[in-house]
Amino acid sequence: MATENYIPDEKDLSILRLLQKDAKMSIRDISARINLSSTPTHERIKRMEKLGIIKEYTAVVDRKQVNKGMMVICMIALNGHNKKTAGRFIEEVSKLNEVVEFYNISGDFDFMLKILAPNMDEFHEFFVNKLSEIEGIGQTKSIFVMSSIKESAQIV
């Protein structure tokens, strides 16, 4: 649903800030923190869900605790710039569980992927047997993340 005519007010932004920090926070707790009763708070949340401002609720998982300690940023340039090649590439990469973020970018490369793997051997296996098998790839550049300085899903 389009949000082009809707601009969140300060109460909505306060709700979003609270939910981004703790999506399990109760309506009652949110209401108390923003000085609004429960019913209008609930209505605001439901409206933002319906409009797609709140896309989903999720848990933030420590990747190292689930054996995904290696993070790789992979830049990819396609060898052909047409809708069919790009469409097939997007479709195939979107299926890969190792790819946790996927962006169409400008510049020397066409796409940027954030890939998680347990270790270098597993990344190599993924790269050789899955990613590089996708048609249309012309050039790749892999950047291995040494440490995370800041990771956040908070937007407002």
Image: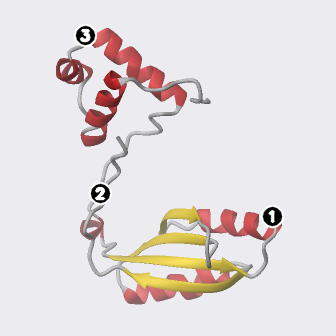
Mark sitting earlier along the chain (1/2): 2
> Could you tell me the amino acid type at mark 3?
Ser
Q: Is residue 92 left or right of residue 49?
A: right
The C terminus - image quarter: top left
Residue visible at 26% across and 62% down in the picture: 62
Viewer-closest of 47 and 155: 155
Q: Please, is residue 127 above or below residue 5 in the view?
A: below
The N terminus - image quarter: top right
Residue visible at 25% across and 69% down in the picture: 149
How packed is label 2: few (under 14 Cα within 10 Å), some, or many (20 or more)? few
Residue visible at 63% across and 84% down in the picture: 132
Q: Is residue 146 left or right of residue 4?
A: left
> Could you tell me the amino acid type at mark 2?
Val
Mark sitting earlier along the chain (2/3): 3
> Could you tell me the amino acid type at mark 1?
Lys
Where is residue 53? Give x, y as percent: 48, 33
Mark 2 or 3: in front is: 3
What is the number of the mark on residue 149? none
Snapshot quadrant of residue 150: bottom left
The residue that disc 2 covers is 61
The residue that disc 1 covers is 83
Q: Secondary structure at mark 2?
A: loop
- Look at the image and name its color scheme: secondary structure
The residue that disc 3 covers is 37
